[in-house]
Image: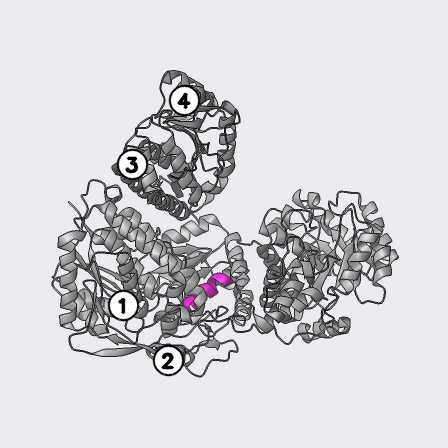
């Protein structure tokens, strides 16, 4: 819709003020609400029952950490401590790898694939049954809104198990003439942004392919992985097939180093990913990495504007921006810049930042103090370097870790906020004039995980998709995930794919 | 060709080739956004506030071939005093009837504050010559109707004769005099959200005071995504010109939960300024009792039965 | 005094319900009176299948997979009853496992059977499989349960709806399966099972102009005649085997659609 449809309006000081006076005149008595405040709508927390302390889940049993070291895990929206978690040391990791190796050699890999499939189907079904419980736990421990954990994380997690269950006994169709065999024992290290979903992304294909696993959840979000052990128990999965060892980076390092591990799968920061790649050099261990991103969300002048706004908002504020594929750089075609930014700023005022367990919350808590500090630091740098900051008015709770959804305009490619991954609810806006320029700017980064394209024109979508150096391209949508859809990055965003037929490949050996 | 209040640039003839280029809407995204807004959890005080507002914005409607003075009288009583047992329940905004029943409605509603809205322009099809339609509008205005609900000519719209559609709205607005004009788009016949947006912009440019989704004569009409598209068009007109046009979803809103979802849509798209009968109406009939049921449930804590609420 | 059991009445399974044959006829099989479907029952079943097709075909592949998995759950719950009506436990276990196997294919077919095609030109070109529509299935006489499942699942997995004529001599397993279908989340009309005399029903199904494909697995007598009848509306004709499992079985009931779109700014 072009400008001036309804003709040039008569000059007026403030259209809204004048309209309001006319309105008040017409009103004749009916009250105008200052605002309609939605009452708190908390999801009941008592569906989750937490233990005071958790051990490590090895060989189907709960064991105490050898060195007895523990740490506390909290609710980041209130800083309330939730439980004591074990810090797995080298001996514990050793036991876990042994249990996994034992289960692999003596049973799991020899089980008929159709039987393996049925275990995974069981797990999928149980996750569906207990989905509300897990969703509440995920929001409690991680800070994300219950609406997201309930409507995105949980359904996708169950779906991943469901999808890969179906591949377990069909590998010869996925890889014809290649005689696929499991790799053995997989060491898996996952991040805190989608704790259960990342577990599903790792465990489901690994098990479907016939491997056993040693998995370390992130330090700040161990609880859903620990509850998952109960699902494993209910499914009667043979002991040692799934082993969960909690701990910080030291535990991860132990897993990476352990000679009994055949394959490492890591999702996390690019720096740690590089360290792991260095560590594994010369070992012939298989490796997949899913690292950071600085995705460009490209909006052309013919994009359906209101829906593009939703896509932009979803791209960077979904899960508080704690998303590796977040659309953190908005590339707007200059001809619609003013209109788009006005709509975007207006849209930000309707984002509800609040308690993760409130069903109306759109943006939850930042996962940790560490992450909050990182975000604050980068936002400071944005101000320092000269970008213009916009934050909608927002009252934040006193306790807990919070950050207001933020937009930076007048951002140059060279600013830190346009180069470095912030991993928070902060959007940087840049402009472009032509498709060529958009592609150039979008690709001008060491990252290459994802990108977004907004335009009505089909051929342009395909042309952009062809030229963008990113593992996932979303056209007229953003942050869409499905177990059937391969996900992974180009360049420093990592290598290997998760999801789809291609997601099986990292967990198999072939002849040739 | 009639003169519009402000003849906008871009509406010069020929209009036909230009309109299809305007305003694309992505179906998947808009349906998703509407669904997300529909998940808002509105409880307790917030819910009671919304239910009260819902009643105050209802256009209580009867548009049947079998309507009689008796039926309309009873409807008017219900409109003024929806719950005889509970005086705190407000009156609805208006009663909406066919032209022949306007005198009865005017008589029964005199002094109550409840408006009389009449459909006109060969409702619901709109398939009649313009002079017949205009005569109908003049008649109902003369009878004293406060509001006119017209239908656009969908046949003309879908065959690309946008100038005709535009012209008719302008002429009806003229003929409506002081009565406020709601323009019914009949979104269920328009086929795409793109068309809903275009028809909305067209109607507003031609002078509509309200744009309305449907006649209520097609099965399901006022879906959340359609309402969202219309609200976004209203917002764009407001941002550009300062003119505030009202919105009326009608058809298919049968229960309180849907009504609250529609109110959430308005709240988060246009803001609280639109949450008033002057700018928002709900076209409904059976909705009213469900809202009364929900109000009593909120107040007493017990689920209710329809037996305890009068049908009219 | 021993208790008198309440005996089951064996009816047809059409549109998610269990009607008797409109002809009112029955025949005796396995010591029971079993509904003897007529040509009008075939007509009604095809109508039900056609009516159910849009919804079944437009469900996400994931949803269809879950529904078929639930069918396996319901069959597992009827383990004992099913075992009585076929050759025994082993056949039941094989049948259930086959349903699970096929259920896992719904969301993988496109990746194995479809493709993105590297055409010579600036075009994006892709091929997707789609269901063909209503599939008529003549079920094998034996094995009573496994044969039935073997022929029913491939069309369903691809998103088709089915009108099946059960084994004539051993139809009870089919009705038991129908009960499992009715209590799973399979929408009414997606699977319709007719019991009766094959010689009466097969020609009607083969000639029906609103049936898109025909599986002659259990056909006996003049197959050539049935194939000739099928030619009237160019049905896809398949000679299904009674005990096989493969995604290519599913392919037999799929259409392949190829789409072109230019690539350019």
Magenta stretch, residue numbers: A309-319
Residue density around tag 2, few if under 14, some if 14–19, many if 20 or more, within 10 Å: some
Q: Nearer the viewer, mark 2 or mark 3?
A: 2
Do discs 2 and 1 share a chain? yes
User: In this rendering, which labeled residue sits more in front, label 3 or label 4?
Assistant: 4
Q: Quadrant of residue A469?
A: bottom left
Numbered mark located on residue A80 in the image? 2
- Answer yes or no: is residue A142 visible: yes
Q: Chain of mark 2?
A: A
On the image, which quarter does residue B240 sit in? bottom right
Same chain shared by disc 3 and disc 4 = yes
Question: Disc 3 is attached to a residue of which chain?
Answer: C
C118 relative to A65, above or below: above
Q: Secondary structure at mark 1?
A: loop
Tell me how far mark 2 sits from mark 3, CA to CA: 54 Å
Q: Output the chain of dot 4.
A: C
The residue beneath circle 4 is C198
Separation (CA) of disc 1 from disc 4: 60 Å
Do marks 1 and 4 both belong to one polypeptide chain?
A: no
Q: Quadrant of the C terminus of chain B?
A: bottom right
The dominant secondary structure in magenta is helix
* Residue topped by disc 1: A217
Would you call the spot at circle 3 few (<14 residues within 10 Å), some (14-19), or many (20 or more)?
Answer: some
Mark 4 is surrounded, within 10 Å at the Cα level, by few (under 14), some (14 to 19) or many (20 or more) other residues, namely many
Q: Residue A229 at what x, y percent from top left? A: 27, 63
Do the numbered discs 2 and 1 sit on residues whose CB atoms are within 8 Å?
no
Please report, as a chain letter, where disc 1 is located: A
């Amino acid at each position: 819709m072009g400008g001036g449809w309804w003709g040039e309006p008569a000059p007026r000081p403030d259209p809204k003020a004048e309209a309001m006076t006319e309105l008040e005149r017409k009103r004749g008595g009916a009250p105008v609400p200052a605002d309609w405040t939605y009452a708190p709508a908390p999801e009941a927390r008592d569906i989750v029952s937490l233990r005071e302390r958790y051990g490590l889940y090895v060989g189907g049993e709960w064991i105490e950490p050898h060195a007895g070291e523990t740490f506390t895990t909290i609710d980041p929206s209130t800083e309330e401590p939730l439980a004591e978690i074990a810090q797995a040391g080298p001996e514990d990791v050793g036991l876990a790898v042994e249990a996994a190796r034992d289960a692999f050699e003596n049973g799991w890999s020899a089980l008929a694939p159709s039987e393996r499939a049925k275990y995974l189907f069981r797990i999928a079904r149980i996750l569906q049954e207990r989905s509300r419980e897990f969703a509440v736990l995920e929001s409690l421990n991680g800070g994300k809104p219950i609406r997201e954990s309930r409507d995105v994380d949980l359904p996708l997690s169950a779906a991943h198990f469901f999808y890969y269950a179906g591949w377990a006994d069909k590998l010869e169709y996925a890889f014809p003439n290649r005689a696929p065999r499991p790799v053995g024992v997989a060491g898996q290290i996952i991040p805190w942004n989608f704790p259960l979903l990342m577990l599903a992304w790792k465990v489901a294909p690994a098990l479907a392919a016939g491997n056993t696993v040693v998995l370390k959840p992130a330090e700040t979000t161990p609880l859903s992985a620990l509850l998952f052990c109960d699902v494993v128990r209910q499914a009667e999965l043979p002991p040692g097939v799934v082993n969960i060892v909690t701990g910080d980076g030291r535990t991860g390092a132990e897993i990476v180093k352990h000679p009994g591990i055949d394959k490492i799968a890591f999702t996390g920061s690019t720096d740690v990913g590089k360290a792991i790649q260095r560590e594994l050099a010369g070992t012939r261990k298989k490796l997949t990495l899913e690292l950071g991103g600085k995705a460009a969300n490209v909006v052309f002048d013919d994009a359906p504007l209101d829906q593009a706004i939703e896509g932009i908002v979803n791209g960077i504020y979904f899960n508080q921006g704690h998303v590796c594929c977040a659309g953190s750089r908005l590339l707007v075609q200059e001809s619609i810049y003013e209109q788009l930014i006005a709509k975007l700023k207006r849209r930000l005022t309707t984002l509800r930042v609040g308690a993760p367990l409130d069903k109306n919350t759109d943006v939850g808590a930042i996962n940790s103090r560490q992450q909050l500090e990182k975000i604050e630091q980068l936002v400071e740098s944005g101000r320092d370097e000269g970008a213009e900051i916009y934050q909608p008015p927002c009252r934040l709770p006193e306790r807990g870790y919070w950050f207001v959804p933020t937009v930076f305009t007048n951002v140059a490619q060279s600013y830190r906020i346009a180069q470095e991954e912030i991993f928070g609810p902060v959007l940087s806006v840049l402009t472009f004039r032509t498709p060529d320029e958009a592609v150039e700017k979008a690709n001008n980064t060491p990252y290459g995980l994802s990108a977004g394209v907004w335009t009505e024109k089909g051929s342009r979508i395909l042309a952009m998709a062809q030229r963008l150096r990113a593992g996932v391209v979303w056209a007229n949508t953003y942050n869409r995930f499905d177990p059937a859809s391969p996900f992974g990055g180009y360049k420093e965003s990592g290598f290997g794919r998760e999801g789809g037929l291609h997601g099986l490949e990292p967990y198999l050996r072939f002849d040739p | 060709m009639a003169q519009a209040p402000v003849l906008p640039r871009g509406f010069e003839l020929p209009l036909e080739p230009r309109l299809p280029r305007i305003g694309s809407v992505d179906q998947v995204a808009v349906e998703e956004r509407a669904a997300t807004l529909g998940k808002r959890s509105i409880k307790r005080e917030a819910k009671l506030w919304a239910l009260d507002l819902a009643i105050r914005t209802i256009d209580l409607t009867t548009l049947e071939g079998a309507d009689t003075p008796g039926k309309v009288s009873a409807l008017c009583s219900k409109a003024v005093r929806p719950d005889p047992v509970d005086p705190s329940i407000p009156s609805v905004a208006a009663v909406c009837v066919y032209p022949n029943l306007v005198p009865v409605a005017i008589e029964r509603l005199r002094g109550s504050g409840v408006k009389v809205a009449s459909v006109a322009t060969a409702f619901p099809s709109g398939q009649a010559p313009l002079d017949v339609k205009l005569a109908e509008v003049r008649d109902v205005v003369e009878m004293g109707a406060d509001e006119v609900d017209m239908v656009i000519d969908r046949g003309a719209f879908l065959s690309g004769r946008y100038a005709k559609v535009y012209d008719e709205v302008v002429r009806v607005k003229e003929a409506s005099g002081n009565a406020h004009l709601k323009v019914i788009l009949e979104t269920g016949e328009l086929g795409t959200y793109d068309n809903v947006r275009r028809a909305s912009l067209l109607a507003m440019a031609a002078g509509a005071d309200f744009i309305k989704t449907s006649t209520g004569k097609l099965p399901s009409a006022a879906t959340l995504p359609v309402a969202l598209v219309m609200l976004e068009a209203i917002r764009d007109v407001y941002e550009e010109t300062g003119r505030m046009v009202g919105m009326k979803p009608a058809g298919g809103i049968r229960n309180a939960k849907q009504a609250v979802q529609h109110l959430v849509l308005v709240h988060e798209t246009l803001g609280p300024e639109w949450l008033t009968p002057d700018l928002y109406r709900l076209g409904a009939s059976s909705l009213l009792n469900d809202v009364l049921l929900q109000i009593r449930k909120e107040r007493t804590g017990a689920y209710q039965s329809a037996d305890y609420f009068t049908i009219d | 005094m021993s208790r008198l059991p309440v005996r089951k009445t064996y009816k047809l399974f059409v549109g998610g319900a269990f009607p008797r044959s409109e002809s009112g006829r029955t025949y005796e099989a396995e010591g029971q009176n079993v509904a003897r479907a007529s040509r009008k029952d075939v007509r009604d079943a095809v109508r039900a299948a056609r009516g159910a097709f849009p919804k079944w075909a437009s469900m996400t592949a994931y949803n269809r997979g879950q529904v078929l998995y639930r069918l396996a759950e319901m069959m597992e719950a009827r383990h004992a009853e099913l075992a009585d009506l076929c050759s025994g436990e082993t056949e039941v276990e094989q049948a259930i496992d086959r349903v699970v196997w096929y259920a896992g294919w719904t969301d993988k077919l496109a990746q194995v059977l479809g493709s993105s095609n590297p055409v010579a030109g600036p075009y994006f070109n892709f091929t997707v499989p789609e269901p063909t529509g209503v599939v008529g299935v003549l079920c094998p006489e034996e094995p009573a349960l496994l044969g039935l499942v073997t022929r029913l699942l491939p069309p369903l997995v691809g998103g088709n709806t089915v009108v099946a004529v059960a084994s004539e001599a051993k139809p009870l397993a089919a009705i038991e399966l129908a009960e499992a279908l009715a209590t799973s989340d399979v929408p009414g009309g997606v699977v319709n099972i007719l019991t009766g005399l094959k010689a009466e029903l097969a020609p009607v199904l083969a000639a029906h102009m609103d049936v898109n494909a025909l599986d002659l697995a259990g056909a006996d007598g003049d197959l050539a005649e049935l194939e000739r009848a099928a030619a009237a509306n160019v049905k896809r004709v398949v000679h299904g085997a009674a005990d096989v499992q493969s995604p290519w079985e599913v392919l037999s009931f799929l259409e392949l659609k190829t789409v072109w779109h230019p690539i350019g700014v």
